[in-house]
Structures are given as C-alpha cells and as structure tokens.
Image (tube, rainbow, N blue to C red):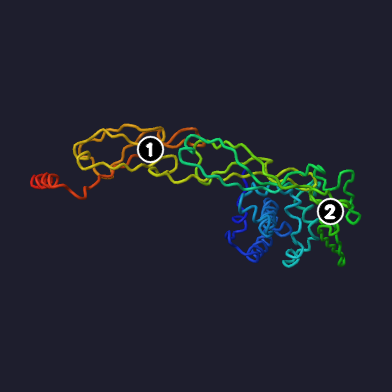
Amino acid sequence: MSKRDYYEILGVPRDATKEQIKDEYRRLALKYHPDRNKAPDAEAKFKEISESYAVLSDDEKRGQYDRFGHAGIDGRYSTEDIFRGVDFDEILRGIGFGFGGFGSIFDSFFGGRRARGPPRGGDIRYDVEISLEEAYRGYNTEIEVPRTERCPECNGSGARPGTSPKRCPDCGGTGQIQHVQRAGFMQFARIEPCRKCRGKGTIIEKPCSQCHGTGTVERNRRISIKIPAGVDTGSQLLLRGEGDAADQGGPHGDLYVFVHVRPHDTMKREGSDLICNVEVNFSQATLGANLQVPTLDGPASIKLPPGTQSGAIFRLKKKGMPDLHDGGKGDELIVVKVRTPGELTSRQRELFEELSREGL
C-alpha cells in the first residue's frame, strides 16, 4: 500500500508552522499512545503519526518531502535517520508519558535499531522544457548535470593517499553519543551526533589535497535521458543513483527530471485530447467545404457540412496525445470559428446587402 500524506496524517495544512505541527502531534499522541489506547491498531497509528512528526518537524526532511514526496524520504533516510534528533522525550513527558528517550521509543515501536551505514548522497532536481511535438513523439536528449562525485584522488575517503581515516575515540566509530539520565525508577536517554567527528564516526588527520577531506568533488556529468511519449508538464523522471555522491563512500542520491511542455501556437491540451481552433469564412460555413486542418502527424482533411455554425466541434479519432498509462491515444477536437468579415469591398457589400434583402 502507498503511504498516506504526512500532512494529512497529522491533519495540518502544508504551510503549517512547527508549533502547529507539534500541537497536533501532542493531541494525536495522547489519543493513540498504546499505554492508553488498547485498540489493535493504536500502535500502528502511533507509529504513523510519530514518523510524520519526525519528518515535518525537521527543516531538511520536510523540504525533501515537499519537493519529492515519499520518494524524497524513503531510501534517502534509514528508519533510524528519520527519528534521529527528535526530542520525543520532552513531548511525551509533557502529556504524562515517561518514554525514556529516542532509544526507548524506537525499540518499543519500530523494531529496534538498524545498523548505521554510510549516508546516502543528496537528490538533484533538473528541469527540462520540450515542445508539444516532442511530448507527442517522445524525446531522447542529453543533459549536463552539475553534481558532486567521489574524489578520484582519495577514492572518497577524504584522507590523503597513503593514509586512512581514524576511528573517533569519543564515540568509538558510531557517530553518536548517548547521554543517560536517571530520575528515581525512570531512565531517560538522549542521543546526539558526536561533536568530535560530527556524526561521521571517523576523523581525518591528513585531508586529501584535492577534496580537502570531504571525499567529493564538483563535476558536470552528461546524462542521456529518454522522455516517453505522452508526458505533460509536471511529469517526473527518476534516475536512480545519478544524484550527488555521499560522504564516506555511501551511495549516490537520485536525479529527478521535471518536464515542462511549452504552450503550442495552435493547440491546447486537455488530458489526452488536443483542442484546435480553426477559422472558416462565412461562405465556407454556409455552403460547406473540404478543410485541411493541422494535427501533430501533419495536415488532415475534414468535410465541413453546409450550414456549419460557429463553435461546432469535429472529432479526429486518435489524433490526440498518447496515454502514458494504457498506451492508447486521445482525440483531436477541431472547433470551428466562423470569421465575420471586417472591411468589405463595394462588390462584397453589394452582395451582402442583396443577401440581407433575401433574409440571410
């Protein structure tokens, strides 16, 4: 099943302040905390609202979620990463529950700790603009994306060649420091990133001269992309592993290509259908005519019956846009606009006056 929207879970608008988000979490935590609510689904709901709060209360994670949805969170952060740094202790104590810190809440509701691996690199957004014709046929192109890549000099370690990072003596290589506080029979634990190694678990004594200890360098990478037929403005392509490199040799982030389709001179898109306005003169509308109309496959012929009114619609089957989901095609709708003549020659005026006398 797809995950529900974090904002919807907490019942807050997308522009909610941190305080509003915190208030709603407190209210829902009081309602669904398994120590108080014995319903079979209470624990699952408590987990759901806690995950939502952990993401939306953190500026970086909330920014990733606002831009990319759940794809910006899943894979980029481990379960432990999502909850790291959230002071559940303070919130839950304030509503009458002594939970014992992040470690305790994580172990009790989220299946214990996961082993920490190297962090994942950042995701990149790239916007590309194409024409309606390119969206109709599909479009292959090459883009140049600025991103960070693993330093070739130190192979991403950040340490000068011939040396290697040393395990941090303060945290023992975990990247975290746990502070335990006892109050009678209760115990509170607070976990925070190690200050000495800044959460990395290692210390570089002799930094690489090329990347200055970061393990990554800035590069422009040329990437071939294939935009499928039928895309519309707002469509996204996900290229796994084409984002920024990560510190400590972790996996690359992802590249999100956002597609924008330029407005067309004569056609307007509505779903998979195309709308095209075609002007005809008074005589063609009255007497009927064979018309050449534009389509994205080239000109097509339609027969205009005598007495066609302005606004009449003619449908060209399967001349619309391809459907990304079922492979079918929409239609093109030709909307007739009868052009009323402006300036008339004396002969034209004479003929129209004669028609007027005939009641036309």
Residue beneath disc 1:
332
Q: Is residue 277 left or right of residue 233?
A: left
Quadrant including the C terminus: top left
Residue 320 in view (yes/no): yes
Most extreme residue toward the right is 169
Residue beneath disc 2:
175
Mark 2: amino acid:
Gly
Mark 1: amino acid:
Glu
Q: Residues within 10 Å of mark 2 (few under 14, many from 20)?
A: many
Quarter of the rendering containing residue 171: bottom right
Quarter of the rendering containing residue 226: top right
**Location of residue 319 with respect to 338 vertically, above or below:** above
Residue 334 image offset from top left, x and y in percent: 33, 39
33, 106: nearer the viewer: 106
Callout 2: SS:
loop
Residue 331 image offset from top left, x and y in percent: 39, 36
